[in-house]
């Protein structure tokens, strides 16, 4: 009891929290990149490169707040490249949007994928 009281008073005196700096930094980082897609049930929207989508960190980030993203970006579903001024988005007749570099570089493959989607 006396040890806990000493620690509490020492933390208050030096304006320290009960959590370690590592824990606070990890929680801040996970909260910054946590999105609703990380918790969808279907699993298809989970990004394999996202740390929050991994099983171990997903449970740790669950009580943390979601990130607020004021700016969004388009990502090509085939190549995974960001669509910007160097790779502008191109909408195809089927309604899907792909990056220009994919439609130019892999024209035959893209036509095959479009034909498969139409069937």
Image (cartoon, grey):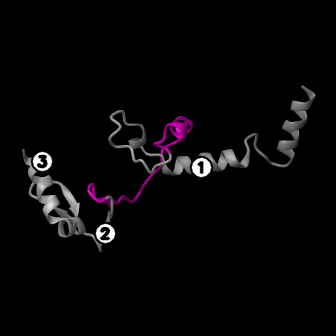
- Residue at 40% from the left image edge and 47% from the top image edge: 47
SS at mark 1 in the image: helix
Q: Which mark is residue 28?
A: 1
Alpha carbon separation for disc pair 2 and 1: 29 Å
Q: How many marks?
A: 3
Q: Is residue 81 left or right of residue 59?
A: left
Pick the front one: 26 or 115 = 115
The magenta segment = 52-79
Of tags 3 and 1, the one toward the viewer is 3
Q: Is residue 95 visible?
A: no
Label 2 crowd bin: few (<14), some (14–19), many (20+), radius 10 Å: few
Q: Residue 107 is drawn in which quadrant?
A: bottom left
Q: Which mark is residue 117?
A: 3
Asked if residue 74 lies in the magenta stretch, the reply is yes
Image location of residue 42, percent across then percent down: 33, 34
**In the current view of this chain or complex, which residue is farthest to the bottom?**
86
Q: Is residue 6 visible?
A: yes
On screen, residue 59 above or below 84: above
Of tags 3 and 2, the one toward the viewer is 3
On screen, residue 20 above or below 74: above
> Is most of the magenta stretch helix, strand or loop?
loop
Image location of residue 10, percent across then percent down: 88, 42
Q: Earlier in the sequence, mark 3 or mark 2?
A: 2
Image location of residue 62, percent across then percent down: 52, 36
Q: Residue 60 is drawn in which quadrant?
A: top right
Label 3 crowd bin: few (<14), some (14–19), many (20+), radius 10 Å: few
Image location of residue 75, percent across then percent down: 31, 58
Pick the front one: 113 or 96 = 113
Q: What residue is disc 2 on? A: 84
Alpha carbon separation for disc pair 3 and 1: 41 Å
Q: Earlier in the sequence, mark 3 or mark 1?
A: 1
Label 1 crowd bin: few (<14), some (14–19), many (20+), radius 10 Å: some
């Amino acid at each position: 009891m006396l040890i806990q009281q000493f620690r509490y008073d020492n933390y208050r005196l030096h304006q320290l929290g009960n959590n370690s700096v590592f824990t606070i930094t990890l929680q801040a980082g996970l909260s910054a990149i946590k999105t609703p897609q990380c918790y969808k049930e279907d699993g298809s929207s989970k990004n394999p490169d996202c740390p929050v989508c991994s099983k171990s960190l997903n449970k740790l980030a669950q009580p943390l707040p979601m990130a607020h993203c004021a700016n969004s970006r388009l990502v090509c579903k085939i190549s995974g490249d960001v669509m910007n001024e160097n790779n502008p988005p191109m909408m195809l007749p089927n309604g899907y949007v792909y990056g220009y570099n994919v439609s130019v570089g892999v024209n035959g493959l893209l036509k095959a994928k479009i034909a498969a989607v139409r069937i």
